[in-house]
Amino acid sequence: MVAIYLYHRSNEPIEIDYLIITRDSDLEEIARRSAFAMTYNEDDFDGDDNFAERTTLLEEALENGTLAIEVRMRLSEPSAINTPAQQFIPSNPINKNILSMYLDEESSDVVFEVEPTNVPKSKTRLSSKKKAKPSPVNFNAHHLILLKSAPALAEMCGNGGNIAITDVEPEIFRHALYYAYGGKVADEDMQANAKKIIDAADIFGMVNLKLEAEACYVKSTDIDLDNMMDNLLYADAKNCALLKEAVIDFVVENDEDVLEKVSLKDMPGGMFADLLTAMARAKKKDANAEGDGVKLSTMRVSELRKKLDEKGLEVDGSRESMIQTLKEHTISDKFDSAGQARD
């Protein structure tokens, strides 16, 4: 008889299913050995002392003097007995802890008094009495948390106390402050108030919130001949590079209609480079692909921001400033602190 065995030489345990077969010249089975859920530790083995008759293998299984053995193996499901149960480990609670401090009066060191800015006017003139001015909405906050999440808002705090906010609606301020504590603005609220949130984030120095609101606005807004100029002027005023890119793309795709139906006398300065960039992308379709194969000059705003973020650089700004920052950082990477070229 001929014996056959599988040996486990690794020092790590393994659990497998296996099948061993020998066949004749017509590929018919002569002998087989199989096992399921076999657990092997270091130097363990398994097999059969009486796998097949020697004469049968010599007469029927040899092919040009060679014995072919078919072996199939696969990892089986780990045994519940031999495998320790997966342990639950709670995640780091820092984000949850900070969010729990949102509007906490006891620990706060500053109170923002946000005055309503969209109070409806009285519809009647019969009353000679002046209506009382609506009371501001108070928001308790923590200067230390705002230092990183909303630096411009933190600067307004001064030595703490009560700080008046007059240029942002209370509900928009609520969204911004909640975001500063690690919360998320609900999708429906973001879509309904995207421009107001962009304005507030721009005032308070909340770059991530501004970019998130800008992306939402671009996604939910259909640029057309009627609104393109308003959106372009707004994008230029607020340094919204993604929105500006969307408008410029519309202009290039609808150039004849724009020239015929839209007055371009109010076009912001510096649009020539953006128009050339969009035209270059339109001619070279693969310029939309991400990666180092695309030149910075024709790269999409989202990809420029991604590269800046990966390098820990400022992601807010015009496409020109983003490209300049990336170029300067690339040059500085080539030299050490002493001004010597790196190897």
Image (cartoon, rainbow, N blue to C red):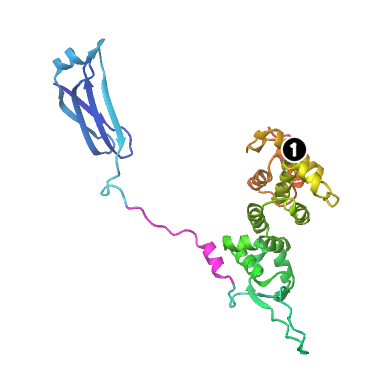
Amino acid type of disc 1?
Answer: Met
Image location of residue 16, percent across then percent down: 28, 37
Badge 1 marks a residue whose secondary structure is: helix
Image location of residue 87, percent across then percent down: 37, 55
Image location of residue 310, percent across then percent down: 63, 46
Residue with the mark numbered 1: 279
| In the image, residue 147 lies in the stretch drawn in magenta | no
Indicate the quadrant containing the C terminus: top left, top right, bottom left or bottom right: top right
The part of the chain drawn in magenta is 85-102
Dot 1 crowding, Cα within 10 Å, few <14, some 14–19, many 20+: some
Where 54 falls versus 274 (above or below)?
above
- Kindly identify the residue that appears in the image at 33 percent across and 34 percent down: 10
Majority secondary structure of magenta residues: loop
Picture quadrant of residue 260: top right
- Kindly identify the residue that appears in the image at 72 percent across and 45 percent down: 250
- Kindly identify the residue that appears in the image at 55 percent across and 66 percent down: 99
Image location of residue 151, percent across then percent down: 70, 63
Indicate the quadrant containing the N terminus: top left, top right, bottom left or bottom right: top left
Q: How many marks?
A: 1
